Amino acid sequence: MIFQKNNEVKGNAGTDGSFFGLRSDERDFFSKNKISRILDSSEALGSIVFIVCILALIRIWISASPGADVYFYPPFRFINTLFAARDYIFLGFIGLYIGIRLLRVVEEATVVRRELSLRTNALSDRFDEIDGKQKKIDEKDRQANFFLQALDTAQKQIVDQSNELINERRVTTALMRELDKFTLAVDNASDQIVFSNASGEIIYANKMTERNTGYALPDIIGIKPGKLWGGHMSISYYQNMWNIIKNKKEVFIGEFLNTRKNGEKYNADVRISPVLDTKGDIQFYVAIERDITRAKEIERVKDEFVSLVSHQLRTPLTGMRWLIELLSREKKGLSKKSVDYVNSMDISTQKMIYLVDEFLNISRMELGKAYAVVPTEINITALIKEVCSEQKIYAKPNHIDIVFNQVKSAPIYIMADADKMKQVFTNLINNAVKYSKVDGTVEVGFMVEKDKVIFGVADSGIGVPEKDKELLFSKFYRASNAMSVDPHGSGLGLYIVKAIVEAHKGTISFESEVGKGTKFFFTMPL
């Protein structure tokens, strides 16, 4: 046993009566026979010494009696002889006795030493054996303590794991409830929602997918959408899509031409988002698709209507402008008031023609035809001067100066579409004049920087509120304070400017502060 009570090992006595493995009959030094022999020898020697002492005392007593002569008594003659040589005999006897005793003691000591040596060796071996057993007991005790600690640790870990499992079960249960809610929400969404794995194969789709495409969920699991209802766009279009969602790991927004199961084609507005794990690896994709076929048809009809109406309006407006110009030339027969009326009519007609032109441009843009630029080498310096001169007629009523800050006297040439660049400067300068304060100034300038030209148009007008800045280039959008200045604006000018600049591979931006004016900057490649 590993653990024992102290009283169970007291004496370490063996079953044969031995002490530390020695039997009682082997302990001769402590046996009765050995003691008896020693006592017998001592008793015999003591008797002899006693007799000799008695005789010596008798002789001394007789010698001490007055007139007594012990030498003449026959019994004492031998004694006298002995006493004559008593000293030598006594010394010899004493030496013999001592020698015998020493020999006996040495013999006994040798035996005792040998027996003690044997017992010592036996005891040492026994102690070594006991020490070895004790070490084994200690090792087993250490192992037992280690196992007890390990068992205690394992028990704690089991308790902790049990608690974790309980918590995970609670979390899982909560997640399952949330998943049920999520599934219910996804299945009842009005848009088509498709989940695909990292390879693009469908792993789940909501009910709207079946209603929209005609394919049931079991029929599309494990198949790529391009093999079912997609695959009608160009290869480069799909390559760009995969580059965005797989390599850049960004959201792709675009339109697709798809086919339903019955062969009917439809247009879809699609947003595909990659879902990443904590390491940034793609786990799956979520595609949200909306059928925009009807919306595109309505948009197309609207654009055709705008285009038709714009063309129909432009014809009479052109005639009106021609008649007004004729009246302007015949100022001799007109009163000053009539001349002012003619000038007002001219300005209004130009505004109407400008507005119709904007609608025509927007119509072309929506139909996918707009701003296919035809670049030619143009003198941009001369073009800016021409536009500034034309816009002075609008600036004159409010006494607004249009200043062209020409950095270089030599003209600058760029590759661009002349008509469209003229429209960009016309829109920006016209806006600057329109929203400038009375007696204000509009500055126009440019600077050459490496492989591009940076143009700027600045005014000291009403500025753009912070909340309107993000949507300033949107179609039909107008800043809140701009509508109070000019209620009749179309909200198309800046939208067209941005489209033209980007068609020339340029960029446009602005800086503005309410009450302190606005600065527009755009770049054009050289």
Image (tube, rainbow, N blue to C red):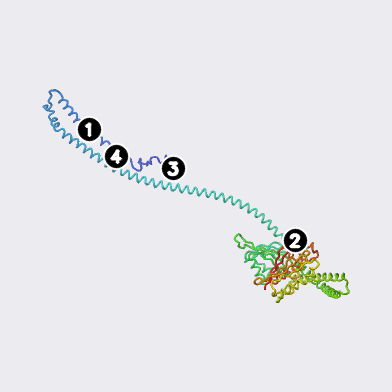
Of residues 152 and 410, the one nearer the viewer is 410
Q: Which residue in the structure is indicated by mark 2?
A: 515
Of residues 504 and 187, the one nearer the viewer is 504
Q: Which residue in the structure is indicated by mark 4?
A: 29
Q: Is residue 457 visible?
A: yes
Give whichever of discs 2 and 3 has the lower sequence position. 3
Q: CA distance from mark 4 to mark 1?
A: 23 Å
Q: Which numbered mark, 1 or 3, is in the foreground of this view?
A: 1
Q: CA distance from mark 3 to mark 4?
A: 34 Å
Amino acid identity at mark 4: Phe
Q: Which residue in the structure is indicated by mark 1?
A: 46
From the image, which quarter does the C terminus lie in?
A: bottom right
Amino acid identity at mark 3: Gln
Residue 4: give its label: 3
Q: Which numbered mark, 1 or 2, is in the foreground of this view?
A: 2
Q: CA distance from mark 2 to mark 4?
A: 128 Å
Q: Is residue 266 visible?
A: no
Q: CA distance from mark 1 to mark 2?
A: 146 Å
Q: Secondary structure at mark 1?
A: helix
